Image (tube, helix red, strand yellow):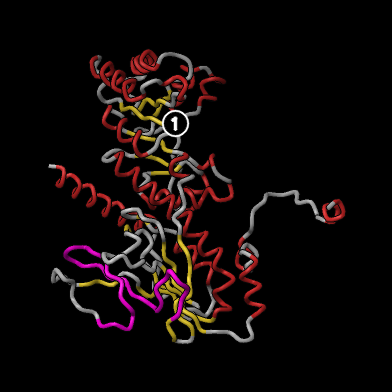
Amino acid sequence: MKRLINTVKDHSGFFIADEEEIRAGKASDVYFSRSMKGLSHDQEVVAEITSSNEEEWITFSGLKEVLSLLSPRNLTISAIEEGEIIGTRDSAGIPVPFITIEGKYSEIGEMETAILGLICQSSGISTASSRVYIASYPYPFYSFGIRRMHPAISPMIDRAAYIGGAYGVSGILGAERISMEPIGTMPHSMALIMGEEEAWKYIAHNFPKGKRTILIDTFSDEKESALRAARMFPDIDYIRLDTPRSRRGNFPNIVREIRWELDLRGFKSIKIMVSGGLDYDSVAKLREAGAESFGVGTYISSAKSIDFSMDIVSINGNAITKKGKYSGKKDVFRCSNCKKLKVIPSSSRIGKCQCGGILEILNRTVYEGGKQVKNYESDRDIRMRVTKKLNSILSKSSTESR
C-alpha cells in the first residue's frame, strides 16, 4: 500500500472535470469503456432514458447540455422539450422516455454517465424551483443557494433554478450565462463593518428603485429594527429577515407582527423579504403570514436528483432490453383534452384518446446527423413556458379546492 501511495501524483488544483475530459468519456464509469473494448463489432442501438421517480410531476431540464455533449456525433435524438412539466409514467403506468438516442453503441455507451448526470441534477433543481414557485405565488423568489454546492457547477444550478421558475439568481456567472443581472441584497458583514445604519443608508441611496432591500436582523429585535429602518428610509422597497434558526422562534409569527406594526404606522408600501433555510412548506407559511419575497438556498441548490436511467431497448432493429424495462422504441403523446399521457411503440398507428381528444406527440426529433434540427429556445422562453404551466396547475388547484 505504501508503494502504491508513493506512485500517485498529487493533484493540486480543483477536483473537477473540464469539458474536454467529459467529452472524452473520462468522467464516465469505467465499466462502459470495458464493454467497448470487449465488443467484437459495433451495433446499431436505440437507448431510452426513463425515470423511476414517482412524483406527480417533474420539471425536465439539462437537455441543452446533453445535446452539446453529443455534438457532433452521428446520432438521432428525440426528446421531451426542456422545461416540460410532466409525469414520469403514462396513465397506464408505462415509463415515459424523456430522451431517445439512436446510433452506434460506440457513439453512445461511454457517454451514459455524463448524459445522466447532466439531466438528473438539473431536473432535480428545476423541479424544486417549480415547487417553490407554487408555494410563493404570486410573489417572487430568488435562488440564493450556490454557496452550498461546488462553485464549478454554480452556472448550472442558477440556470436550472431559473428555468424552474426563480425570478432571479444570486450568482454572477450564473446570471451572465442566462443573460440577466444577478440579484442580491446586503450581507450581515456589511452591517458589521460599516455599521448597521450606514449600511442601510448606502443601500437606500445607491440602489435603484425596486431593489432597495435593507437587512434588519444583524443586531436588534426584528420589529424594532424594521420600524427604525422604515422611519429612516420610508421609500425603501423591502426589509429582509435572515434570522438564524436559533433565534427566530416562530418565524411566521415574527413576520405577522412586523407586517402589523409597519401597516399600523403607515409603512404599507414597504414589503418583507425572508431568507434562511427556507423550503416549500416554510415559504407557503411565510407567504400566508405576510412575506412578499423569498430568498431560497439549499432546498433548491441541493435538491434531490431525479433518478433517470438509460437502457438499450433495441439492437439492430430488434426490440430487446433487460428485465424490468419495456423493449422497443416508443413515442410519447399527451391528449389535448384530458391531458393524460400515452406511451406507445413507435411502429403503432396513432389513434385518438379514449376521451375523444387529439393525441399530440411530445418527444420530437431534436438532433440528427450531428446537428440540431431546430434553433434552441432561450432560457427566458423556456422559463415562460414553465411558469405558464405552473400557473395552470395553480388555477386548477384553486378551482378544485372551492
User: Based on the displayed image, in which of its 4 quarters is residue 383 positioned?
Assistant: bottom left
Q: Residue at x 39, y 20 (%)?
A: 249
Q: Is residue 147 left or right of residue 159?
A: right
In the displayed orientation, state which residue is furthest to the front: 323
Q: Is residue 264 above or below residue 377?
A: above
Q: Is residue 72 above or below residue 264?
A: below
Question: For the magenta stretch, what is the residue range?
Answer: 320-349
Q: Which residue is mark 1?
A: 276
Q: Is residue 392 above or below residue 239?
A: below
Q: Secondary structure at mark 1?
A: loop
Q: Residue at x 81, y 55 (%)?
A: 8
Amino acid type at image mark 1: Gly
Q: How many marks?
A: 1
Asked if residue 340 is among those painted magenta in the image, a careful observer would answer yes
Q: Is residue 366 above or below residue 241?
A: below
Q: Quadrant of the C terminus?
A: top left
User: Based on the displayed image, in which of its 4 quarters is residue 255 positioned?
Assistant: top left
Asked if residue 343 is among those painted magenta in the image, a careful observer would answer yes
- Label 1 neighbourhood size at 10 Å, few (<14), some (14-19), many (20+)? some
324 or 49, which lies in front?
Answer: 324
- Residue 20 in sight in this render: no
Q: Whole-percent x and y of residue 293?
A: 34, 34
Q: Whole-percent x and y of residue 161?
A: 42, 48
Q: Residue at x 33, y 39 (%)?
A: 140
- Residue 259 in sight in this render: yes
Q: Whole-percent x and y of residue 108?
A: 54, 74
Instruction: Kindly report the secondary structure that dominates the magenta region of the rendered protein.
Output: loop
Q: Is residue 382 left or right of residue 160?
A: left
141 or 98, which lies in front?
Answer: 98
